[in-house]
Amino acid sequence: MRKQKPKYKQIIDAAVQVIAENGYHKSQVSKIASQAGVADGTIYLYFKNKEDILISVFEEKMGQFIEQIVQSIKHQEHAQDKLFTLIEMHFQQLTADHHLAIVTQLELRQSKKSLRLEINHVLKPYLSVIDDIIKEGIEESLFRPDLNRPLVRQMIFGTLDEVVTNWVMNEQKYDLMDQVLSVHELIVNGISIHTAKEE
């Protein structure tokens, strides 16, 4: 498996930096190889082409991210707390790696349709984690039972995604972590069973 090969992570990390600094279209394989400290030909032992590198970057980073979230929320009792942790970790991951934030929020959006479909496939497990939190919240009678779960799932992911994109577009001039509480309150207030009763 290529992930277990010694230079895989080295190339992935180099690709994140090169694509963030130069843009996907201007990031030649030779630049990525140079940043990783490997020969150009070595790249092709791991990846078919530049598109494969970009998909692998997202797959690798998103895979690690989902694993961390699942571990962190496993022992939390309530859906609201799990949602808070998910939001916090989503923002934390991208605050910690500004190159990765540029790649995921900007460069992945400029790619062709086939690549976007691959990326949507990689996102499915993350959307499943969000879906499970919504389901638990309904079962706990915290969230409204009449929620359209697929819609709410997309709304939550879309909100987090847009908040991070706006932060990247503003050249990360403010602390993204300051938005966690407000985003959590906004989402929970929108889907909470108590809000529905008050209406």
Image (tube, rainbow, N blue to C red):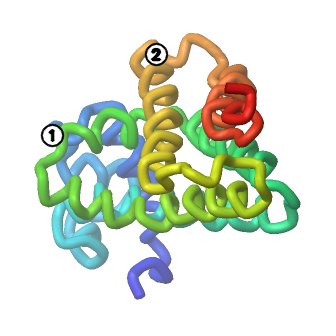
- Picture quadrant where residue 122 is located: bottom left
Which numbered disc, 2 or 1, marks the residue closer to the eye? 2
| Residue situated in front as seen by the camera: 68 or 179 | 179
Q: Where's residue 99, x and y in %?
A: 46, 36
Mark 2 or 1, nearer chain start: 1
Question: Label 2 neighbourhood size at 10 Å, few (<14), some (14-19), many (20+)?
Answer: few
| Residue to which mark 1 is pinned | 25
Q: Is residue 177 visible?
A: no
Does residue 83 sit above or below 125 in this rendering? above
Q: Amino acid at mark 2?
A: Glu
Place of residue 88 in the rendered image (x, y in percent of width and height, measured from the top left): 70, 40
* Residue 194 image point, x, y percent: 76, 36
Q: Is residue 25 visible?
A: yes
**Residue at x-position 31% and y-position 41%:** 19
The residue lying at 72 percent from left, 42 percent from top is 193
Which of the image's four quarters has the N terminus? bottom left
In the picture, which quadrant includes the C terminus? top right
Find residue 90 and report its horizontal and vertical position in percent. Answer: 61, 43
Q: Quadrant of residue 50?
A: bottom left
Q: Who's the residue at 46% across and 64% down the image?
A: 60
Q: Residues within 10 Å of mark 1 (few under 14, many from 20)?
A: few
Residue denoted by label 2: 171
For label 2, the SS is loop
